[in-house]
Amino acid sequence: MTPDYNKLSMKMHKKYAGKIETNLKVPLNNTHDLSIAYTPGVAEPCREIAKDEEKGKTLTWRKNLVAVITDGSAVLGLGNIGAAAGMPVMEGKCALFKKFANVDAIPICIKTQDTEEIIHIIKNLEPSFGGINLEDISAPRCFEIERRLKEELHIPVFHDDQHGTAVVTLAALTNALKIIKKKISEVKIVFSGAGAAGIAITKLLLAAGAKNIIVCDSKGAISNNRTDLNAAKSAIEKQTNPKNESGNLKEVIKKADVFIGVSAPNILDSSDITHMEANAIVFAMSNPTPEIMPDEAKKGGAAIIATGRSDYPNQVNNVLVFPGIFRGVFDSGKTEINEKMLLSAAKALAEHVQKPSSEKILPGVFDTGVSDIIAEAVK
Amino acid sequence: MTPDYNKLSMKMHKKYAGKIETNLKVPLNNTHDLSIAYTPGVAEPCREIAKDEEKGKTLTWRKNLVAVITDGSAVLGLGNIGAAAGMPVMEGKCALFKKFANVDAIPICIKTQDTEEIIHIIKNLEPSFGGINLEDISAPRCFEIERRLKEELHIPVFHDDQHGTAVVTLAALTNALKIIKKKISEVKIVFSGAGAAGIAITKLLLAAGAKNIIVCDSKGAISNNRTDLNAAKSAIEKQTNPKNESGNLKEVIKKADVFIGVSAPNILDSSDITHMEANAIVFAMSNPTPEIMPDEAKKGGAAIIATGRSDYPNQVNNVLVFPGIFRGVFDSGKTEINEKMLLSAAKALAEHVQKPSSEKILPGVFDTGVSDIIAEAVK
């Protein structure tokens, strides 16, 4: 029987008041220690940074510090629950940063959901952090926030819901295609979901060589017949759907080699999979309930199935990626995270699975060395 | 020989990259742990907080978390060195919070020095923290920022440069007066310094029963003849200087029982002390160089001398106060820090010295139990 994780989680959060804490990393046991860590000695690093702000990134905890920032507008599968209610997830994310890559991380929950205000606030907080991980901010606002911060800040900015998901999905797809012996440049890939994750995965697959992708949102395939597209969807339309197919998901999924879902639960059934090409790859990553349950996908003939869940094989989990990404940029002093790094990270992650099989296309979350190989790839 | 603390401090900051880090306080060793600390279990505390935001203060690390916030406008004795350069001091302060009262604290350095923008940003960050410690923000801006945040936020707000300094000074004065057998209501107290600390100490001494205080700024005594006073000085003028004395510090210090300096180095000499009443009390707290060096004050006949320095007796150090203040409010779930609490804290701190003497009017920084008795007093 599956434990009642809701109940266990409430009990734990009540008992410990969250999951992270701060700690000293230098001794503070007598006035000598105090004179070094605090006055009068501390004046010296202050003066050094006042002369050259860049030194703030090596003489303070900023060197290893990422802020996990949300406005609470798209938290997990819970939707727009607000900044305060997003804290348990952000704190959990910070715990994962520390656990898997020894990156210090603090949660920052911002009350406003106004795009310009969020950008303004984060810009003013730049001297506090070494890097920024945007989290659970709804699309399309998240694209503008990320783009502007990348442009205007001098520290690395990463939106994990986009790029973490994209890297782990590309790694999974790389191994899945290897197993069934198809090439990314030749397969037809159909997406369900054109939010932050869907669009970012699409872009990274294109960069990795995919040529035939159709992205569907809740109204069906994104084609140039559509007149209701926002800027992000409109941009993606220009790079996808080469035959300009129209229709809903169940129509365009016919003859697809790969289905990637980052959308809503239970929108496909086994007959939809039956209409895909032989050796279908089905990544149904809606959380906690996938677009199609693994058993149902298998019934329809899927050769390789992945979900976001830990209770089925092939969990597509961002935690394989984001800790190592920041470990890599902090260790190498990089100030941006670009597409080339993401492609390298995906390649390294795929190669970390020594013998990929239909039940093992990704490393496990607790496999050793994962964040190290990601960090190396980023450097 | 005194060690070169500047050099030792630079070496330490380079080696460790600062002084604090984050840490896990719950296990995260397998998928079971992950399901409790993160998905799917974490959804439950999120939902609870979405229903009632107040629960965010007990179900997350906010329960024990203070943000140490600066704009870098008045850092130590270094002046307006900016947000990035303020970080080593803020991080040190956070280390002290943890060391002396097991309070988690994170440094937040805000780039803008515009009062309204700072207020706006901090208000938007409220869902991230359990309490706010304003630090090293220049006067008179700090008064407005503190006042507005106290009014508009539902978490405790404390400006340590004002109130921490005021509490420890009142405690020191209480014991000093006990030793020389004078009453606070009967002594003439002359201040040098009408910034954040000077004004806050003045207010707390008035609340503790002082009746005859003269505050001097760099232009001399604040009296109702002055036409150049800002709002904060003007307000303090109405409560001080009962005989409306004019003149510079060296004039009005004559016949004073107590001198309290929070201003500039070396502005008094032994002859000034000679002109004070017998058994003069001299708190020369300018840092690192006092308004008058202890030896010089003694030569002038001072009975009790205190400074901000650790290398002389009677160090008046805020670290005796701020950790315990937040320990107290967090343990009791209080949402404000008021004057009554500050008076209780000062009383408790004074009483913690079992046998006050001219060389021991305050507990030492590393004396055990200090933050506990402050926390108890606040509750």
Image (cartoon, coloured by chain):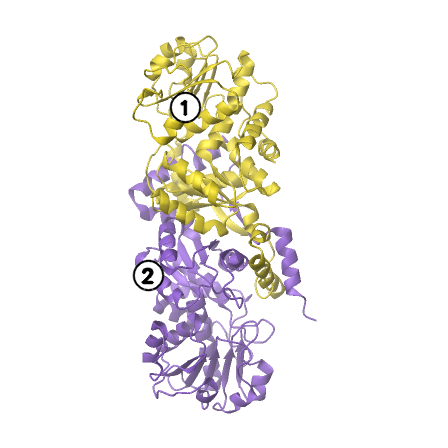
Chain colours: A purple, B yellow
Q: Position of residue B22 (x, y in %)?
A: 51, 50
Q: Residue furthest right?
A: A1
Where is residue A310, by image quadrant? bottom right
Cα separation, mark 1 vs mark 2, equals: 50 Å
**Subunit bearing disc 1:** B
When the figure is inspected, residue B94 is found, relative to residue A193, above or below; the finding is above
Could you say which is closer to the camera, residue B31 or residue B132?
Answer: B132
Q: Position of residue A105 (x, y in %)?
A: 47, 54
When the figure is inspected, residue A266 is found, relative to residue A87, above or below; the finding is below
In this figure, which residue is indicated by the disc labeled 2? A148
Question: What is the secondary structure assignment of the residue under circle 2?
Answer: helix
When the figure is inspected, residue A325 is found, relative to residue B153, above or below; the finding is below
Tag 2: residue type?
Arg
**Subunit bearing disc 2:** A
- Does residue B137 appear in the picture of this structure? no
Where is residue B334, by image quadrant? top right
Residue in the picture at 32% in, 55% down: A154
Q: Are marks 1 and 2 on the same chain?
A: no
- Does residue B145 appear in the picture of this structure? yes
Left-right relation of A109 to B44: left
Label 1 environment density (alpha carbons within 10 Å; few <14, some 14–19, many ≥20): few
Label 2 environment density (alpha carbons within 10 Å; few <14, some 14–19, many ≥20): some
Give the label on residue B238, or none: 1
Question: What is the secondary structure assignment of the residue under circle 1?
Answer: loop
Q: Position of residue A1 (x, y in %)?
A: 70, 71
Contact (CB < 8 A) between labels 1 and 2? no
Tag 1: residue type?
Lys
Left-right relation of B260 to A300: left
Residue in the picture at 44% in, 9% down: B277
